[in-house]
Image: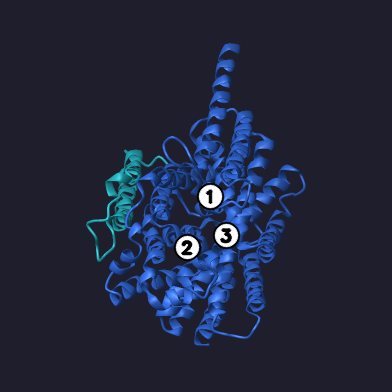
Amino acid sequence: MVSITVFVILFIVFSYLGLKGKDFRAGDLDLLHEWALGGQKFGAWLLWFLIGADLFTAYTFIAVPSGLFAKGPVFFFAVPYVAMGFGVALAVMPKFFAISKEKCHITAVDFIKDRYNSKALAITIAIVGILAELPYIALQIVGMKVVLATLLMQFKGINQNLLNEISLSIAFLILSWFTYKSGLRGATLTAVLKDFLILGTVLILIVYIPLHYHGFYEAFNIKKEYASLNPKLISAYISLSLMSALALFLYPHAITGCLSSSDVKVLKKSIAFLPVYGIGLAILALFGVLIYEVKPAMDMLNHIPPAARGSFVVPVLITSTMPQWFSGVALLGIFIGGLVPASIMAIASSNLMVNILRELKLSNPSNETKLAKWFSFLFKLIPLMFVFLVPPTFAIALQLIGGIIILQTLPSIFLGLFIKNLNKESLLVGLLAGIVVGIYELEAVNHFGLIQNVLMPTSFGPIFIGVVALGVNLFIVSIGSIFQYIFRKSSR
Amino acid sequence: MYYILLLIPSIVYILVFFYNHKSPELLGLPFFYWFQILMLIITSIFYALAVFLGKDDG
């Protein structure tokens, strides 16, 4: 009971901060860039928290530890992915930011429109962005459901699932309400609260558990095969981390985070220190192995159906080793760890929706902000319905597809920054071909059933499907652009 | 210079065979894990050097 009381009190604090966000470095919230980008007034510290919040999602709390728990060290690829991802960001985002700031862009699609002047390409990239974002939001909700289920575990004899879904709906209504009111400012302030709670929890657990159980010896004794990576999986490890790193800043919510910076120097500074943020992620991942030596936690896990066991690793590790009040604080941290990114993702998706409406001449500058606000509401509702209606494994499968399709926007966005004369028709064809190849291969390696595997066999060993899809895409783009170059030269 | 400093940490991470070992352990934690965590800090140092020393081409 104590844990639930603490949880609810902190949730009220969280909602208050989210709503108060609208007065933070106040601006006219009827203007799109004020609502969607926080007026571009964020300094290095706030930006660090905001971009970090994009990274520290329910996916990292639930999916990465779950992967390590079930499959072992290959899932530690999340660590090099984070480190490399910010290197990619430092290479491309300062340039992207400078162009966007100069031309008052709010999304990557604004940039695409400006650079290529192609309606078809702009709309396609906006749709791909939204399609990649929706299952990501759904995954946040799956993570939050796990937290609520852990909290409710202590009560027997009630309809836990119903109570879970009601609480989840209430939390989402509150979130939608303050996202509507405060926009990115609300998300940023709550991101700071979330990070303090989560980093605190992670640090206390990583000191307490090894101290109490005499280091990691026992865990790696039980799981001897987890001590190092199977050499056969090195190709998978490298391709997964490299491609995820390239995809990280193609996600609309990551771009939104960057564009809210006050200037380019601030952006560079905060990205440079973001790999440190990844230490929290690495420790969370380690919990997936550490849990094997914590007997009370393993006892609790054994009551959970095997298919869902992995996702409960972190919440169960907390409740089984820590006092009730601490569990309340920590579980709230993880819970809002899903809510805050969901808010940023919904804002980013609704900005893309405005792009689409603008291209189709269905909106005008006077109603765009209003439309974006309502769409941010809709883009939280759709994933919520989705989670209630389909099993969680399906949400995870869609997220894996999302990762592959968002990668296909790389030539248009990242390469377009550095190479001026890319051929716009082949960018579109390459993008679509990459998506088709990616999804086909994904279905093929999973024998056209539920998607669980994202690796395909090659002569170098298993590699991430994204590599092949991006390869096809880049091939088409370069052929098309070289032809265009030669044709223009000869016609002169 | 800016891009070279950005590239170095990624190259270290890609050379998996270099850190894919059990020993030396740290409190029972295999080298594979703690080396990559330590590398996160080193990565930030490299990136910070790039940002502060590299030319401002943003």
Check whether the beta carbons of the residues at disc 1 and disc 2 lie within 8 A of each other: no
Image coords of residue A403 (percent x, y): 55, 48
Q: Which chain is rendered cyan in the image?
A: B
Residue at the image point whose x is 29% and y is 58% from the top: B34
As shown in the figure, which amino acid type bears the numbered disc 3?
Ile
The image shows residue A447, relative to residue A478, as above or below, that is below
Picture quadrant where residue A393 is located:
bottom right
Q: Residues within 10 Å of mark 1 (few under 14, many from 20)?
A: some
- Kindly identify the residue that appears in the image at 37 percent across and 42 percent down: B56
Residues under numbered marks 3 and 1 in contact, where contact means CB atoms less than 8 Å apart: no
Q: Secondary structure at mark 1?
A: loop
Position of the C terminus of chain A by quadrant: top right
Chain A tint in image: blue
* Residue identifier under label 3: A344
Residue highlighted by disc 1: A453
Residue A213 at what x, y percent from top left? 30, 75
Alpha-carbon span between mark 3 and mark 2: 24 Å
Residue with the most extreme left position:
B24
Viewer-nearest residue: A173 or A208: A208
Query: Which chain letter matches label 1?
Result: A
